[in-house]
Image (cartoon, coloured by chain):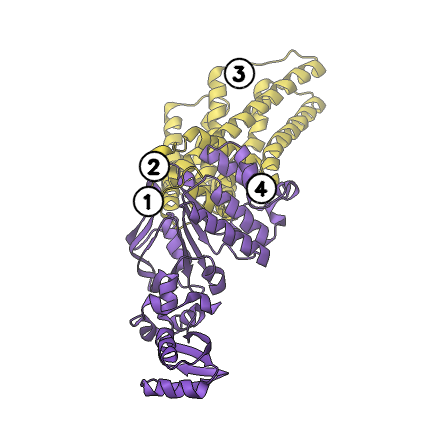
Amino acid sequence: MSATPTADQLTLDIASVRPVSFVSLVRVELRKMADTRAGLWLLISIGLITALVMVIQFWVGLANDMHLTFQDFMIGMNTPMGILLPVLGILGVTQEWGQRTALVTFTLVPSRVRVLAAKFVGLLVWAIAALIVGLALASLSNILFAAMSGDSAVWGVGIGDLARYLLLHVLGLATGFAFGVLFLNSAVAIVIYFVYSFVLPGIFAIGAQLMDWFAKLQPWIDFNDAQSVLIGESGTGKQWAHLVVSGLLWLVLPLVVGVWRAVRAEVK
Amino acid sequence: MITVSGLTKKYGAFTAVDHVDFMCRPGRVTGFLGPNGAGKTTTMRVMVGLTPPTSGTVTIGGHRFADLPNPGRLVGVLLDASAQHAGRTGREVLAISAATMGLPSTRVDEMLEVVGLNATEAKRRVRNYSLGMRQRLGIANALLGEPSVLILDEPANGLDPAGIRWMRDLLSSYAARGGTVLLSSHLLHEVEQVADDMLLIDQGRIVAGGDKATLLASTHTGALVTSTDNAALAAALAEAGLTAAPSGAGLSVNAEPLQVGTIAARHQIVLSDLRPDGGGLESLFMSLTSEGQRDVLQGDPVPAGASSEGAHR
């Protein structure tokens, strides 16, 4: 027991211990996302489902004698990634509360903001790894498709396109993370995220058709729609402004409110 | 080492912890005793920053818990042994804590051995652990960073008698090396045998506190005495103005054992048994945690020298 005090020492010598570094916190969070069956299978399934979608797209393309390019495969990947990365973002936060491990985590690291930041960085690392795997699968599909269809492979994807592709999925992950922090409950956060992601765009579209004033407002508050600037053709400055403004509403606001609450709330 | 001053925690109209003040000293085991819902857990949660207090402060070694640079290396905490991811193995739970604190993984194996979880058990998922195994894992987790302060909430819950004995020895030797231990329990006997100091809490208030011997002395209302000639002794006691009533094989006297012994010696009466009556922590515990009798027992305690703790056992 090296740190044991003598009986007359009433103060703890805090200079003798090294503070917990942010890098080791991130490493711990990375590990916590993969050290349970549930976490590990979520990560594996992101790869497997993406591969499955590629295969389907590949055979449909061949059967219909289509001319698929690298960009087509990249866009095909948006569906599985667009669903699974937000789920990863949600579960990455909520599992700590759901399994009550927050009790131990926050007694080891009292700064909850640091823990949440480390979680986000850890999730980002996993997400980028998933996206790289996705790009590798898309490349492989493109090469194989060219070989089997007899056409020459079309790449035609610039750095700008790749950056927008990355941004699209990082935003998806971050939005999931924000919903997770806001609700601190896996089931609630996932359900509400899917309502936001699949039901709300339809309601917005109907509202825009029925009401003129809403049609003008809608681009500024529809974060899902605004993200189309990140897919395919590069958009206008105004479209980017839509992305930023609607992002403040659906990503930044829940994140700020959620972190504010998580830092103050009692950890049960 | 742990100083709690004026701590209050309210949930709406309900006051869970009500102006609590106490101190836990190094080299001693402090038992935190009270019925379920008395405020023990809330107090401990406030100590480690999981629950914000309504008012008051807690410092550990002079620092707020939140200001400790690497709390796990200074303060070992076990609040709820079941608050672990059911899908992680026991070893992984400790490995994560060790990685957070910046400790080598060899430390994990050391602690597994200390708490008696073998290699097979350590590889099992926490979901398959008994409550006793979870407690052992939780204690290993608390001890991992070689802290000098331990805060343990109901650590004996779910341990078998051998496990309780093991924990008692562990904590005693930990305190003997200068560590500060605060452990809570709603079971008197768990605490009584290991604690040097005791705190009794009921309905959010500390109703009694101090070192165990003094507390025990405060519970005695008289003496139980048996002699070879009870009739003669009764007469001698009556002569001294004391009341002696038959009780079992002996007499119950409204005086300190010392006083009774002195009178018996003066009259050359042979005593076969002499001990404090009406005492014991159990009666203290029971009376303090039931309404109405609180004031009587908080009244002036009799001198510590007058009691013999050993005679109780």
Residue B163 x, y percent position in the rendering: 57, 54
Element marked by disc 2:
helix
**CA gap, disc 1 and disc 3:** 60 Å
Query: Residue under circle 2?
Result: A14
Q: Which mark is residue A157?
A: 3
Q: Are marks 1 and 4 in contact (CB under 8 Å)?
A: no
Amino acid type indicated by mark 2: Ile
Taking B151 as reference, is B59 left or right? left
Residue A50 x, y percent position in the rendering: 61, 29
**CA gap, disc 1 and disc 2:** 9 Å
Query: Residue under circle 4?
Result: B113
Residue B112 x, y percent position in the rendering: 57, 41
Element marked by disc 1:
loop
- Of marks 3 and 2, which one's residue comes earlier in the chain? 2
Which residue appears at 58% of the width and 25% of the height? A134
Quadrant of res B199: bottom left
Q: Is residue A4 visible?
A: yes
Report the front residue among B76 and B274. Answer: B274
Quadrant of res A245: top left
Q: Which chain is yellow?
A: A
